[in-house]
Image (cartoon, coloured by chain):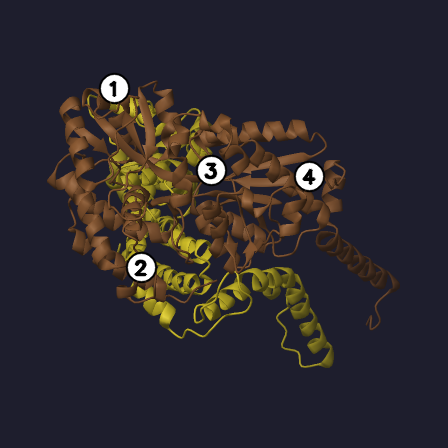
Amino acid sequence: MGTSTVAPETTANSGAGQRRQGRPVLAGLAFLAPFLLLYTLFLIGPSVYGLVMSFFNTSLVKGGLGSFAGLSNYAAAFGDPQFWSSLWHTAWFTILTTPPLVILALVFALLADRAKKGRWFFRLAFFAPYVLPSAVVALIWNWVYTPDLGLLADVVTRLGLTPPVWLGDPNWAMISVALTTVWWTLGFNFVLYLAGLQDIPRELYEAASIDGATPWQQITRITVPLLGRTTTLVAVLQVIASLKVFDQIYLMTSGGPDFATRPTIQYIYDVGFTDYRVGYGSAVSMLLFAVILVVSLVWFALVRRQERDA
Amino acid sequence: MAALPSRRDVLRATGLLAAAGAVSGSLSGCAEQLQSGFTGTAPSADVLTYWNLLGGGDGVRMQEMEGVYRKQRPGVDLRAVTLTWGNPYYTKLSLATLGAQPPDVAISHLTRVPTLVSAGLLQPFAPEDLARHGMSKDKFVQRAIERATIDGRIYAIPLDTHPFVMFYNTKICKQAGLLADDGSLKPLDSEDALVEALHKAKEVTKSWGGAVASVADVATPWRFFFSLYGQLGGKLLMGTSPEEILEPDKAIRAAKLMRRLTVEEKVMPPNIDYGGAIAQFANGRSGFFFQGEWEISTFKDAKMPFSMTRFPNLMGGTYAVQADSHTFVLPSKEPYERARLDLVLGFVRSMLDQSMTWAEGGHVPSWLPVQQSEKYRALKPQSNYVGAAESAVYDPPAWYSGSGSNFEMVAGSALGGVLSGRTQPEAAIRQIQVGISKMARTPAPV
């Protein structure tokens, strides 16, 4: 983009013109070079290397690629129930977190936007958890979830219910992690929605209220449709982020109890780093990459179509 | 225009190049000087970094021992780091060694040593270096030091042996008539003797005779099984096909005894987790408890009447019991310099000499000068099961085995099913054969 704004639109065929055309392209490339260099060095390079390793029995502790494995790493992954269960855990986490992180973010953004006084406070309150590092979040919520003496156990007991062992019960562990994640990352979507809300012209609401529209009608007929693009963005980013879950699960449950919460990335970590099988780990990474790509594209297409139909 | 670069351009480019060179040079070559420059510490030859995975009571006792070492060697800056137990620890140790930033000395389970050695991540201890610090091979528990010797070279110095043992409630056992006149437990060295004793204890407690963890804990069922299987003289990992993973006849016999105790005789609870089994014993709801000796601290803290003895010889063969050892290793891809090696060996020797402190946590010292001392023999109930050290069976060497490993997960989950009554012994053994054979046929990454 930078180049096209710098480059003058010239059709002159003179020698001078060509020289002038050439220089800005070079300058553009030069500006891009630091980024391209780092991008190639740290993203494209390792990805290609990972793809190559996935076809070999590469070991973490031995030099070189190791013996050629063909597609056997991929076959092993498809035949491994642990891979499938980890993939399901990732999917389950995504299912648990995406709807609340989209819907609640919208609801809170609407509420915060309507606040007349102290709007800065609500914005800060919802966004503040997002700036915390995952280790801090995990520590706070491990205390909240502590059986018997944790904050949540206390609240639930006061309500007259028996609290489950939040992180220790295979049926509850993922739900507990999802709850933590909603609290932690809601702020990001919230800010995107707030920005979207500010782009909606005030006149529309003014006209609507003159026509006698209730606040609820204004929200459903004006705000939500006009936030369509933001919703697409939020939803796609959220699905991708949820499919990449690792750190809070690793820190809070280490994938337990009994592997009930181990996501695919932790499976990759376990086989690749703990078992030294980087070749196999790379193959699983490639599979996860394909899954994320397909899910994102399908999801993106669905949401876009819905948006067009609306 | 401007075909030639101006003088200023040339100067600027040269300056940038020089700066880039200086930065990269200092990052790669002189990181240590740079670090000490920033932090103001003089790069000292007497820094000793030490990694371990010891938590709970063990962690407290290890810190106490480190404190004594610091007093002995005030000139040494000992930097001890405790990391999360199990796989995460070995992952970090491996990656740090691969990244050429390992600690000077580290704790490793003895069963993990063969994998680290075949991955080329450990340096051996030369006998002459050990001799210089008075640590000859004959001063250690032979079973442990032999297991630490791979291809004729010693790769680990064992600090202890921690066997699977039997805890018993002295008050309950007395009421049940299971104690001899001197207050010790009458021998229970046969399958029927144990079952009978558990029944008697059950009559006293009115709930259970004994307790062993079977739910959400894969290590304990494995320890129980492997002790029985070892007493039958069973072999493991003779090959990679399912038929060569273990000896089915012996394995099924061992698993049948486990099922008998929980499902058939109903003298032990079939569904109980690690903490639950501890609570059963600590609250006097069971007369016996089977676990590694390290739980001694838990019951001492509970101030209950209990004692410990070796896991009984139930199968009638040569006595054997599952165990592992904490050892000191040299994590490095490069041989150590003499000064650094001597620093490490001095530290290891100091730890061995403090084995009495370590033994209070239940572990059997590997260092014979302490193990054979009067002082240790007087330490009760710890010295009751000292013989277990020389009868220890260790998990078989394989890249996927060792304490807390995938091997224990596969075998322990199947055996937990046997204790819970979910799986028949034959089916569980088949499950182990198939599951481990799959790992055994995977090309070894080391």
Front one among B119 and A263: B119
Checking the image for residue A135, the label placed there is 3
Q: Vertical placement of B74 versus B366: above or below? A: above
**Residue wearing tag 1:** B171
Instruction: Measure how far apart labels 1 and 4 are at the Cα level.
Output: 51 Å
Secondary structure of residue under mark 1: helix
User: From the viewer's perspective, is B404 left or right of B346?
Assistant: left
Residue B226 visible within the image? yes
Classify mark 3: residues with Cα within 10 Å, few (<14), some (14-19) or many (20+): few
Relative to A143, is B366 on the left or the right? right
Q: Amino acid at mark 3?
A: Ala
Choose the circle earlier in sequence order: 1 or 2: 1
Give residue B121's position: percent from left, percent from top: 56, 55
Check disc 2 and give the amino acid type: Ile
Q: Are marks 4 and 2 on the same chain?
A: yes
Classify mark 1: residues with Cα within 10 Å, few (<14), some (14-19) or many (20+): some
